[in-house]
Structure formats: structure tokens, C-alpha cells
Image (tube, coloured by chain):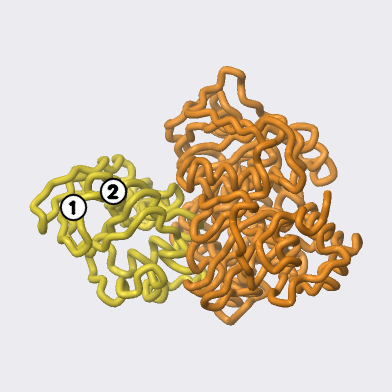
Chain colours: A orange, B yellow
Amino acid sequence: MTITEKILAAHINKKAVSAGELIDVRIDLALANDITAPLAIQAFNEIGAKRVFHRDRVVLVPDHFTPAKDIPSAEQCKTLREFAKAQRLTYFFEVGQCGIEHVLLPEKGLVLPGEVVIGADSHTCTYGAMGAFSTGVGSTDLGAAMATGRLWLKVPESLKLIYHGRLNPWVSGKDLILYTIGDIGVDGARYHAMEFCGEAIQKLPMSGRFTMANMAIEAGGKNGIIEPDEVTLEFIKPRTKRPYKIYRSDRDAHYSDVKEYDVSKIHPQVALPHIPSNVKDVREVGKIEIDQVVIGSCTNGHLDDLRVAGRILNGRKIASSLRLIVIPATQEIYRQALKEGLIEIFISAGGAVSTPTCGPCLGGHMGVLAEGERALATTNRNFRGRMGHAGSEVYLCSPAVAAASAIRGRICHPEEVVRK
Amino acid sequence: MILEGRIWKFGADVDTDAIIPARYLNQSDPKELAKHAMEDERPEFIKDVKKGDILLADKNFGCGSSREHAPLALKAAGISCIIAKSFARIFFRNSFNLGLPLLESPEASEAIKDGDRVRVDLDTGEIFNLTQRKKFSATPIPAFMQALLKDGGLIPHLRNKRKKRG
């Protein structure tokens, strides 16, 4: 069996499951945010449920339009706050403790290897980086799961993606996943588990692994998953005392397909408008001038991401023709970035630093685009109108490419700005 | 269940930001959401769509975010059914959970034209193009999802199950 099949089997108390089987799984954690929770709470109430299945295992994170950007958003946050209070939820993250859900939950030790996690947010697949099964659902599913602690799902086929070789300078997990989506397309892994492995993955820090699993959904995947190793255990150790179980795929596990990549041939990647699979090598995009650079999001708002950006921006100024917005994903990352002098670097370079929020990634607030404007962002989607006006454009890249391009004023390879 | 309506045809990989842009997600009233369905993709859609109309698309319809607001907006706009070559996974679940039927039929997706009138039999998966007088078949909807549709979605379905249990 694959790691995905093993985790799912364990959550229906069976020895084995196979792809295509419909199962009713026990879930370890249910998550919702300020956009999806109000509908989930409505569903929860309409079923006639009284209590959530476990008050430690239902987590609400108001991160999308917060700090509340307008009155309706404030009302949505209020709905979450009141529900959390009425249900005595242990984990409701108020502004000030809050962060972007998919960076916050691993940081707080709320997600562990071998667990089944569902969230009313498509990027819930992020936690697969820790060897958990995690997937995004809609609000109705989430509302029902909050009540029952269970969810029906189809055991997915697994797609094995093997990354061989050594990474080139300035190439990160973001470049690997963009390259992969460019190769297999936005529905290349539809309904599939994407199992990332190979020596290049083993050498990636947790931040890069989170980035890869995070964007499994951009290839249509049900979940992304990476077998836990020393790097995973090192990450978990200071964050939890809860027990967890590590699963690994069998040597004879069945895969619907196996793809192999030589990462030494992969250079920094950019996804051009208006679909994440429209990917090119950064050296081949031509002269693309930009109006705004965003460094942050559940995909690339990790401390490592800010460190890379800081190294490039240190002592330099951004082009006068653009705005740079940097958003640490959590308060803890923000605080650490302050201690390390990164925030000082960003501000000195001419950038704006925001409190944690999903904000501009989905055109919510903190950097919405006007008609005809072009953004380069470390976020995850570049659909038409994603960051604002339907006549604006979004290009996706790594923090290194974003930082270097902010200095140049146009999309460029980091080595144009700094030698590694 | 038999449905009949005008076809609204869309392309491949229509994402949830196109179906309902995130700028309208600061609330979740279906009627408000419906006012902005497909606003950036095809502005005339919301002006002319009639109750019972059917949406037709190419592959991977509804990719992107998990926002249930997307099928909710289309259903509230009057769409009775969506036919496509294929659907993104979360959108597929969300639609059935809300009682909005989806049918997969690559042939119908290719051949049916925008503005055609179509009759759909949800029990058999048969699609009949009244304008072109042509018949297509879709993958039949699994029995347990038919049950969801009959009750009007997952929530009424769970409520009914509770009632039966007494």
C-alpha cells in the first residue's frame, strides 16, 4: 500500500484499503476560516447538531479578510468568534495570535504525521508535507464533519513523483512544484494523491516541502504527501507532546503513474497568466515589467522564505516603479523576522510589511490590483482577476525571484542581482 | 428527474475565482452571490440566465478554491444542472452536497452549442439536444448521490436520515 492508503485504512480500523473504495473515515482535525466557516456553522446548525465532535479538534482561523477589512467581513469573524465561544473551542485564533492557517497549524503542533485532516480551504493539502493525509472540502462537508468527526471519501489513486539530483542555486520547493504543474497540467493529478519523493525532496527543508504539498491542488490533486524523515521529526519535536504514527509506502505499492525529474535541469520558474500550468524558465519570460511584488501567503510566507528574500534585498532598494508587500505568515514568523533584522531590511529596501493575512493572494485586501496592473507574487494562483481587477495580471514565482525582480523592476533571475 | 433549459457554454479549466470572485466572499447570502456569478468571465450571463438553464463546460470545471459559494452562486442564479467533460474534485462534492446535479459527458460537451435547448434525465444520464435533435449519454450518477439530490443536498439528507431513525 501507499502511505496515503495506509493512513486511510488506519482511520477506518482496517488493515487495507484500495484505490477507488468509498470509505467513511474518522478525522483527527477539522479546520475552517472566516470565509468558509460561516456556511459550515450554518450547515452544522441545520443538521440539528448540538456539540462539535471534539473541542480540541475543530479549529477556526480567521485569516482571509482579517484584520476585518470591512463590515461584512467583521460580521463573518463575529460568527466564528461566537461559535468558538459557545462550543468552547480550544483553538480559535484571534487577530494578534492568528496567522495563515496552513502555516499556523503545523507551527502550533496541531497537525502530525499519520493524521487525517480536513479543512474548508483548498490548500489544506499542505499538511501532507508532514506525512499526514489532508485535503480540502467545502463548507457543508466541513459542517457535517464538525458534528460527526467523520467524512466519506474515495480512496485516491496515487501518482509518484520522484525528484533526482541536486538543486541549482536559487531553486526551491516552489520551483519544483511550478515545474511539475507545468508538466502535468492543472488537472494532471485530478482526484489523485501526489506522492513527492527522491533525494532532492529529502534535502528540502520543511518550508520547501510545505510549499510543494500546498500546491498539489493546483494540479487537481486530492492530497500531496511526503514520507516523514529526520527533517520532519526535527520540526515536530519542539511543537507537540501528542503521540503520532509514521507511515511509509511499501516497495510494491501500486501507483497509477510514476514521473521522474532531474532537478539539476530545473531553473527558477515563473507561472504566467492566467493559469498555474503556464510555466516558463525565468530566463525565458522576456522583459516583463511589474507594478507590485507580494512575498507571503500559505505557499511562501515561511521564515525561510523571508530569509531568502532578506538575503537578496539586504542593502538594496526596490525599483521606484513598483510596490513591494511582505507578509509573514504567522505572528511567530513575524517576531523571528524582527529579531533577525529581516523586517528592517524589507523596510529599508522600500517595502511595506503587513500583519499576517491571506489578503492580496485572493484579491481581498492589503494589495488589490487595478485594471492593467501586473503583480509578481509568491502566492499559488494566477487566475484572471485573482488579485483584483479582471484586467490585471498575476505571475507566480519563488521568494528569491520575487525579491530580485522587485529590485530590477522586471521579472529576473536572482543571479542578475546577487551571486550565490 | 427531468430538467430542461437553455445551454450556457464555457471553456476548459473554469476556476472558482471566475465563477464567483473572492471580493464577494465577505458574505454568503446566495442571492447576493448569484448577482456576481461569472461576472468577470461572461458579464451578460447573470443578466440573461433563466431559472432551469443548464451550464455546459469543457474539462476540469470548478478548479481552484474550495469555496462552496461557487456552486451556491450558480444554483441561486437558476442553473439546474452542469454538464462538462470533467469536474474539479472539491467543486464536484460541493455541488452534490448543495443538491446541484453534475453530469460528465465529453461528447455532449463538444457537440452542444451555446444557446441550444437541452433536456436531461438525471436518472439515466441521458442528454437530449432539442435544438439539434441529438442524443448523448453521461456517466450515470451513483445511487447514493441520487439520494442526496432527491433530498435537496447533504443537510436535508442527513436531517431525513435522523427523522427516519426517530
User: Mark 1 Cα within 10 Å, few/some/many (few <14, many 20+)?
Assistant: many
Answer left or right for A183 relative to B158. Answer: right
* Residue A266 position in % (x across, y down): 65, 41
In the image, what residue occupies the spot 81% across and 59% down?
A312
Q: Which residue is mark 1?
A: B120
For the N terminus of chain A, the quadrant is: top right
Q: Quadrant of residue A245?
A: top right
* Residue A231 percent location from the top left of the image: 79, 37
* Residues beneath discs 1 and 2 located on the same chain: yes
- Front in this rendered view, residue A222 or A110: A222
**Quarter of the image where one finds residue A267:** top right
**Who is closer to the viewer here, A399 or A386?**
A399
Rounded to the nearest whole Å, what is the CA distance between mark 1 and mark 2?
9 Å
Could you tell me which residue is drawn at 26 percent across and 45 percent down?
A: B105
Badge number at residue B80 = none
Q: Secondary structure at mark 2?
A: strand
**Residue A48's x, y, as percent?**
46, 58
Residue A40: % across, % down:
51, 60
Q: Nearer the viewer, residue A31 or A48?
A: A31
First reached walking from the N terminus: tag 1 or tag 2: 2
- Judging by the rendered image, the residue that carries numbered circle 2 is B103
Task: Residue type at mark 2: give it.
Answer: Leu
Note whether residue A171 is visible. Answer: yes
